[in-house]
Amino acid sequence: LFSLGDPSSLVINTLEHFDRLEDRCQFVETLVDYEEEMRDKEFELGTYECPICFDECEGARCIRLRGCGHIFCKDCAAKSIAENVDSGANSGSPVCASCTKEVHPVEIRQIVSPEVYEQYETMLLNRTLSSMKNVVECPNEGCRNPHVMLSDDFTEGVCARCMFHFCAKCRQHFHPDTACISGPLANLTPAEGIHFLSVHLFSRDLVERYNNAGPEGKNMLETQHGKLNILKLIQEVASTTFISTECKPCPNCKSPILKYTGC
């Protein structure tokens, strides 16, 4: 502590000087703030080689990352962070150019331009919203707003962008008085259904994840894709698997047939 001052140990018994816990905590915070200030002043007086551009830079032109302690000139650090944000690397969370430690948001704000920081905040917000099980994509084809908040009971949603009011299960117009009878798999011929399954989210992988998930995982998948859609998908996948493994094409019309009697 107090690295620029007296190097001898400094021991202070706060219990002897402060009766209230709040006063003792405030005193400790003051000491920590003072220590950080002294370390910053000591850092600014030094000279450091940037591992990116290899220039010798004064401490005032450098930044020392809190997470790992690596030092860079501010120009190179800002450029590295901007490239991280622009490319979306590490889910939009910039990392140190010398290791994999994430850069603290306060440090990012200190050295990048306002435009880059705004882009970083937007990516951070989008990542947070996407991880919330009550936030889904608007099913309206002309909108596709990626962040629509569902109601508390996960039954409906209203897109703030296009105002589309939809059922959270089947993703169609909200129908409070009737059961879900429509959805992405409704009114499709078997061939169209198989094609839809092959090019959309509803796939064997989704069925496998749903079957292997626990109660909480199943609820999350049902919220994202609709329970009715998943149940239909399970039936379609089971039917497709059975036809492909157990059936043969009819010699005349080529439709799948299953022989169950005869020699």
Image (cartoon, rainbow, N blue to C red):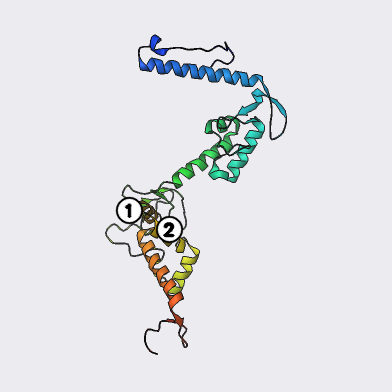
Residue sitting at 48 percent across and 41 percent down?
A: 125
Residue 164 location, quadrant: bottom left
Residue sitting at 59 percent across and 14 percent down?
A: 4
Q: Is residue 238 visible?
A: yes
Give the mark count.
Answer: 2
Q: Which mark is residue 209?
A: 2
On the image, numbered disc 1 is attached to which residue?
155
Compared with residue 253, is residue 111 higher up or lower down, i.e. above or below?
above
Answer few, some or many: residues within 10 Å of disc 2's Cα (few below 14, many 20 plus, some between 14 and 19).
some
Q: Residue furthest right?
A: 55
Compared with residue 215, is residue 207 higher up or lower down, i.e. above or below?
below
Residue 21 location, quadrant: top left
Residue sitting at 36 percent across and 86 percent down?
A: 261
From the viewer's perspective, is 96 left or right of 161?
Answer: right
> In front: 247, or 192?
247
> In front: 71, or 105?
71
Compared with residue 84, is residue 233 higher up or lower down, i.e. above or below?
below
Residue 184 image point, x, y percent: 41, 64
Residue 154 image point, x, y percent: 33, 51
